[in-house]
Amino acid sequence: MQYYSTRGNTAKVSSAEAIIKGLAPDGGLFVPAERPGIFDIATLPDSSYHELANHIFKIFLSDFTEEEIEAAVKNAYTPTVFDHPEITPLYQVAEKEHILELWHGPTYAFKDIALQILPHLLKKALNKTGEDNEIVILTATSGDTGKSALEGFRDIPGIRIIVYFPEKGVSEIQKLQMTTQEGNNVSVAAVKGNFDDAQRGVKEIFNDPIFGDKLAARGFRLSSANSINWGRLLPQIVYYFWAYLRLVKQNKIVKGDKVNFIVPTGNFGNILAGYYACTLGLPVNRLICASNQNNILTDFINSGLYDSGRKLFLTISPSMDILISSNLERLLFELTEHDSEVIEGWMEELKTKGSYRVDKFTLNKIQNLFYAGYADDSKTLATIKSVYNDNKYLVDTHTAVGKAVLNKYLSENNDNCHNIILSTASPYKFASSVMKALRSIPEKESELEVLNKLARITGTTIPKNLACLGSKKIMHKQVITHDTMRDHLLNTLAIS
Ligand SMILES: *Cc1c(COP(=O)(O)O)cnc(C)c1O
């Protein structure tokens, strides 16, 4: 399978190249150039997550050998890294409601599913292409990608990892997770502003050929661990099928029955993987796109107008505090039957006017598959509480947004489908908000103190890498601005 850019101005590349490059040189995103065909659900391997992952990876990474893929899958999804043998276990909370726990990796957010395997794939890709530059992974994070990428890439020879997070846009625990990061090839800096500022800075660096040449002359090549990298999206397709096959195995559905997936959404990466799963033949009724108060995607899916001219709210689900959802470009490219001219036009409008409107035909296609809704913070808190009271199950703030939007969907639709909510983070990652939902807490209590309280009250256990956070040394204290990101990068690499 080959890949090309959504903007249509680059030659086709192998999957190895697409993974190394991250972003296409014309500013677009890499997508499969061919349709991979449709799976026969009845013949998909369902005995282990690994077998299923191998099966799906082999189709999209056709320039990798089977042995390479199997080794990567085996090394990434091991018990020393993921604390559940099913990797993404499915937990039933009500008759037709299931929660797909995507946070059993080392940093307790769903990003680990992709970012634990991406380094293995990247290393193999580098061998294939004979790359001899040192790779610099540049990552903007709304909180979870950063830590997950740092854990995935730390101490890997030939690779550096640099993470930029919005100074005031992440939770206290997310920040501590990143600023205490150990490893000989890691660098972390806070960027003044919000996630979009950090993401814009990273994209500008990627799209600056002169800067790229300067780095290349010094033996460095940039790559991305953000979900603009195809290598981030691909591993996420697997768990959509896995969840479905589990329901079949548990006799809750029969093969062919349609289900709904509810996806707490920010950069549109996770839900886009669900879309690709649909194109591969996964029987899906609706993909439900759940947003927080930054409900730009809700408005877009309901109206066809993508309008970023609005204020970004800092919410209790910070990993979704995003106005420019990069991966939407891939969806639009697919829905317009790969019309890169149209895509380029819309993206140009977004850049210059801050908005674009898709045509009726495309909007219809979107609305046939997607449903969109949002929940503000107070609804989110109320949802955490009611899920806990009704189901004795603790959800984090992002997952609660998903549940709240599902409730709204169910009040409007009666499709009789099973519903699978993608749970994107452990409740402990957002302990203060979760605690606040269950009972009031003193204003001044630090998030680390709250961890203990949450464990005591709910009788659950603090995940081990969070329990030790308080005793870790802060290694990274730098605060920079969007304008000084290039300088910071050069300094980090000790060149100028
Ligand atoms: C990243 C993240 C999201 C949003 O996922 P996208 O792929 O960016 O849409 C939702 N919840 C959590 C906890 C996350 O870390």
Image (cartoon, rainbow, N blue to C red):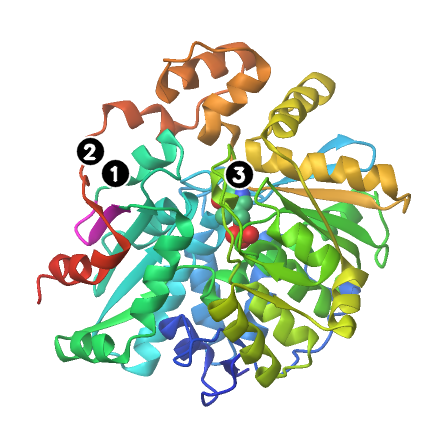
- Label 1 Cα neighbours within 10 Å, binned few <14 / some 14-19 / many ≥20: many
Is residue 3 shown above or below 54? below
Q: Which residues are magenta?
A: 183-190
Q: Are dots 2 and 1 in contact, CB under 8 Å?
A: yes
Residue 381 appears at what percent x and percent y?
Answer: 61, 24
Mark in front: 2 vs 3: 2
Horizontal relation, residue 248 to residue 471: left or right: right
On the image, numbered disc 3 is attached to which residue? 84
Element assignment for label 1: helix
CA distance for labels 2 and 3: 30 Å
Q: Residue at x 39, y 38 (%)?
A: 170
Point out the tag, 2 or 3, that comes first from the N-terminus.
3
Query: Disc 2 on helix, strand or loop?
Result: loop
Q: Which residue is mark 2?
A: 474
- C-alpha gap between disc 2 and disc 1: 5 Å
Q: Amino acid at mark 1?
A: Thr
- Within 10 Å of disc 2 (Cα), the crowding (few <14, some 14-19, many 20+) is some
Q: Position of residue 171 (x, y in %)?
A: 40, 33
Q: Where does label 1 land, which residue?
A: 179
